DNA sequence: GCAAAAGTGTTGAGCTTACACCCATGA
DNA sequence: TCATGGGTGTAAGCTCAACACTTTTGC
């Protein structure tokens, strides 16, 4: 379950997108589904998640965290399947390079049709988690490149939380987080006063030990 | 992974306790471990968790939630094991009735020795989650019976969070939560002014849909 | 009456929110 | 010079922590 930011077709502002793969066999042949695959005996859970990501979409995550283990009896009509789902964030540069083909395509997170299995429910849950983590933890930076302006961070929050935020208060709030480092660089080329660039100095997201937030 | 409140041997105040089972075979034969067991083809994950609870300790949980899926390669020295761990809260009446035997025993959560497998780490993580959920959500009531005084709620919080809380402010905070209902009954038999009894009107904890808190 | 817990009131500190305002740049 | 987003200041309002105070019981 991968999230990335891409510019909206209409407004051009950053929006949440999700890569899906097309089912090429039954059940749910032809429908879109989350990328995934089996766990081998010699890899850990996050390793397996990364590998499946890489194999199906070619993406390398900048953040990876376990979402939930789904084990309902009737998730698949043919057999009992337990899925330990991970969710990942990838940076825009990665997302732009991603393989897109007949059977791998990006969709806007808020405009998905009916997916295979219980994948709509899984995505809803992941979206809920993403919003929660964003509201508390410092996770949004994994959706951005190394350098960013405070307005870009705000756009990420606005895209994910789907509401406008006060620029003045938001910048104070962000500048107060210790992992945010001011640089001496400015983003040139805009139409107006060039904004200062910042960087995130927190480490990439590992797993069950990033207990900064529920 | 079960939590319950029992009176401390020394102070008599409520404390967090955990039932553990003794390993009767290798690996880690003789060491204490979390109760658990295999998942059958015909039961959901929470059903399997409840069943294992029932079979090993005789307890029925008043709250049950998925904790995490642990899948490290070397969790067990003999074979690869993936454990989807649930955590549960049981009410004091249940906990008092629980089977205790040579191979099933209750331990204080803050005084555990070395356990089998990675179970110490799992318990640490569960404790962290419990504290987090307590601080935000309304979960503490699943550790209490149907009727309780506000002072009892405070004792639960003090036991789990391991710090004293202002009685005056705490009661206001609790009374402000909508799921708390005032009754017309009072707890008699104390040494001082009889406190009013309250009850919790929230439903028992289901799973991935109680999204009130991260 | 006295001790102690139950329960209420009040105040000040700190944080959030809303919004007025200045600054720097491209056109 | 003007429009626009970048960036700063500030006052109102809210929440929370501390603590003084009143109430009601057992002894």
Image (tube, coloured by chain):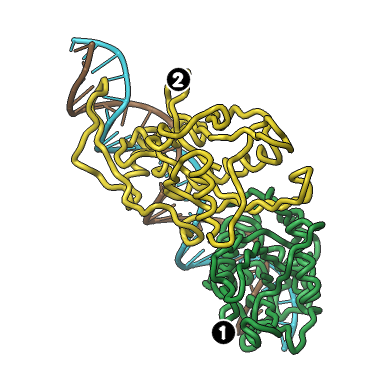
Chain colours: A yellow, B green, C brown, D cyan
Q: How many marks?
A: 2
Relative side of A142 to B4, left or right: left
* Residue A57 percent across, percent down from the top left: 50, 38
Q: Residue at x 50, y 50 (%)?
A: A50
Location of the N terminus of chain A by quadrant is top right
Q: Decide if residue B195 is in sight here.
A: yes
Answer left or right for D15 relative to A23: left
Q: Residue at x 51, y 60 (%)?
A: A208
Please tell me which residue lies in front, A107 or B100.
A107
Distance of label 1 from label 2 (alpha carbons) = 59 Å
Q: Give percent across and percent down for residue A195.
A: 25, 32
Is B199 placed left or right of D22 in the picture? right
Q: Secondary structure at mark 1?
A: loop
Q: Is residue A185 left or right of residue A162?
A: left
Q: Is residue A122 above or below residue B67?
A: above
Q: Quadrant of residue B201?
A: bottom right
User: What residue is shown at x 70% (from left), y 74% (from top)?
Assistant: B35
Instruction: Determine which of the numbered discs, if any, sits on residue B113 in the image.
Output: 1
Measured as percent of width and height from the top left, residue B166 is found at: 54, 67
Local crowd at mark 1 within 10 Å, few (<14), some, or many (≥20)? few
Q: What is the x, y in percent for residue B106?
A: 69, 82
Numbered tag placed on residue A11 in the rendering:
2
Q: Chain of mark 1?
A: B
């Amino acid at each position: 379950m991968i999230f990335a930011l891409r510019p909206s077709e209409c407004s051009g502002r950053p929006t949440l997108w999700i890569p899906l793969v097309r089912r090429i066999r039954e059940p749910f042949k032809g429908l879109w589904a989350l990328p995934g695959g089996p766990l081998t005996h010699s890899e850990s859970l996050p390793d397996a998640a990364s590998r499946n990501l890489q194999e199906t979409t070619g993406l390398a995550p900048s953040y990876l965290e376990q979402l939930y283990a789904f084990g309902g009896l009737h998730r698949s009509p043919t057999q009992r399947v337990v899925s330990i789902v991970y969710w990942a964030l990838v940076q825009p540069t990665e997302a732009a390079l991603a393989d897109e083909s007949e059977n791998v395509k990006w969709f806007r997170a808020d405009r998905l049709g009916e997916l295979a299995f219980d994948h709509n429910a899984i995505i809803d849950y992941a979206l809920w988690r993403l919003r929660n983590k964003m509201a508390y933890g410092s996770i949004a930076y994994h959706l951005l490149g190394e350098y960013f302006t405070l307005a870009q961070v705000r756009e990420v929050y606005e895209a994910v939380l789907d509401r406008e935020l006060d620029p003045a208060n938001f910048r104070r709030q962000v500048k107060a987080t210790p992992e945010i480092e001011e640089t001496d660089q400015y983003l040139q080329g805009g139409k107006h006063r060039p904004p200062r660039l910042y960087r995130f100095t927190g480490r990439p997201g590992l797993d069950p030990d990033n207990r900064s937030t529920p």
